[in-house]
């Protein structure tokens, strides 16, 4: 991975309320202004129609002074409930509910130096659809060698990997990199080497510390990715004796993840989602 330019943000300590337990999470209630609502979305450019209200979230509840738990009619929480934690990616650190809160205009996910980070998963699984989120990410201290990975994923409902597939339509090895990257995994034989298609954005524009609209289309014919309304990858087919076609996941659901690949002594980071919208399949 080549070196990327990182913008360093200054954040404050804040107190997030988890049930009746006050938990101090670095950066969780920093007063970053709500983003401007740019119109360069795949949904508008390609006429995806109206979002599915039950599956979508504008994150317009809570406030910087009183962050809210994500709407549990739409979202599953890390650890399975308020104040809970799960083991992190590949056993590294923890995914904790306390690290994901809504601030009256955006969802903020915080990765701490001790390895605790956030996770959020949709309550709704389906086969095929269109998905779009407005996101940005940044390290909140000078970066070291152990940085968080911000991701947008369609994860298999079966929770079986790799045979269920996995669509990481945004995955970077550190926050705020210059160019977006994706890893689209075929459903494949677990005994085989990882079967995936990697894409790195070429017409990069502003770094990922700035707001970008990241879209994904999944149909019976293909999968495709979009950045600020412009297509940047498309894949179809590719099945062989060890893998199914790339678009052949049985059913999947959206997750937001700020993943820990290293353990502890992490560079603290923030991952913010202004809004998330799901649309019917074409």
Image (cartoon, rainbow, N blue to C red):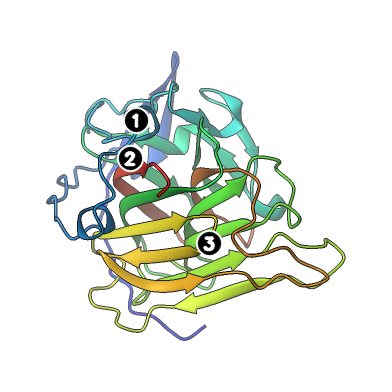
Q: Mark 3 or mark 1, which has the lower sequence index?
A: 1
Question: Could you say which disc has been placed on residue 15 in the image?
Answer: 1
The label number, if any, that marks residue 221 in the structure image: 3
Is residue 39 visible in the rendered image? The answer is yes
Q: Say few, some or many: other residues with alpha carbon within 10 Å of mark 2 (under 14 / 14 to 19 / 20 or more).
A: many
Specify which label sits upstream in the sequence, 2 or 3: 2
Alpha carbons under labels 2 and 3: distance apart: 32 Å
The answer to which quarter of the image holds residue 12 is top left
Sequence order check: which comes first, mark 1 or mark 2?
A: 1
Residue visible at 37% across and 52% down in the picture: 271
Foreground: disc 2 or disc 3: 3
Q: Nearer the viewer, mark 3 or mark 1?
A: 3
Q: Secondary structure at mark 1?
A: strand
Left or right: where 35 falls relative to 173: left
Q: Give how far across and how far down residue 169 sits, in percent.
A: 47, 61
Q: Secondary structure at mark 3?
A: loop
Q: Secondary structure at mark 2?
A: strand
| Label 1 crowd bin: few (<14), some (14–19), many (20+), radius 10 Å | some
- Using the image, determine if residue 178 lies above or below residue 90: below
Residue annotated with mark 2: 107
In the foreground, 218 or 106: 218
In the rendered image, the vertical position of residue 276 relative to residue 238, given as above or below: above
Is residue 23 rendered to the left or right of residue 210?
A: right
The tag on residue 266 is none
Q: Position of residue 281 (x, y in %)?
A: 43, 46
Q: Quadrant of residue 52?
A: top left
Residue 225 higher or lower than 178, as above or below: above
């Amino acid at each position: 991975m080549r070196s990327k330019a990182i913008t360093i943000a200054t954040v404050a300590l804040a107190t997030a309320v988890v049930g009746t337990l006050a938990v101090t999470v670095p950066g969780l209630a920093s007063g970053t202004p709500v983003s401007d609502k740019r119109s360069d979305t795949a949904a508008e450019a390609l006429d995806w129609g109206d979002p599915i209200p039950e599956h979508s979230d504008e994150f317009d509840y809570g406030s910087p002074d009183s962050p809210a738990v994500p709407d549990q009619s739409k979202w599953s929480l890390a650890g399975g409930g308020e104040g809970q934690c799960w083991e992190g990616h590949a056993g590294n650190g923890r995914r904790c509910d306390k690290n994901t809160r809504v601030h009256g205009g955006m969802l903020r996910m915080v990765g701490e130096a001790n390895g605790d980070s956030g996770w959020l998963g949709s309550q709704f699984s389906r086969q095929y659809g269109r998905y779009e989120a407005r996101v940005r990410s940044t390290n909140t201290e000078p970066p070291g060698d152990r940085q968080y990975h911000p991701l947008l994923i369609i994860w298999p409902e079966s929770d079986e990997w790799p045979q269920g597939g996995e669509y990481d339509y945004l995955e970077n090895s550190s926050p705020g990199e210059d160019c977006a990257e994706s890893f689209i995994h075929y459903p494949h034989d677990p005994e085989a080497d990882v079967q995936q298609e990697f894409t790195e954005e070429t017409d990069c524009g502003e770094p990922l510390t700035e707001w970008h609209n990241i879209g994904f289309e999944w149909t019976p014919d293909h999968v495709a990715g979009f950045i600020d309304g412009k297509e940047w990858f498309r894949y179809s087919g590719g099945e062989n004796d060890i893998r199914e076609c790339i678009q052949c996941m049985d059913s999947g659901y959206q997750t937001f993840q700020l993943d820990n690949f290293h353990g502890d002594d992490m560079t603290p980071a923030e991952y913010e989602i202004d809004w998330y919208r799901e649309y019917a399949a074409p």
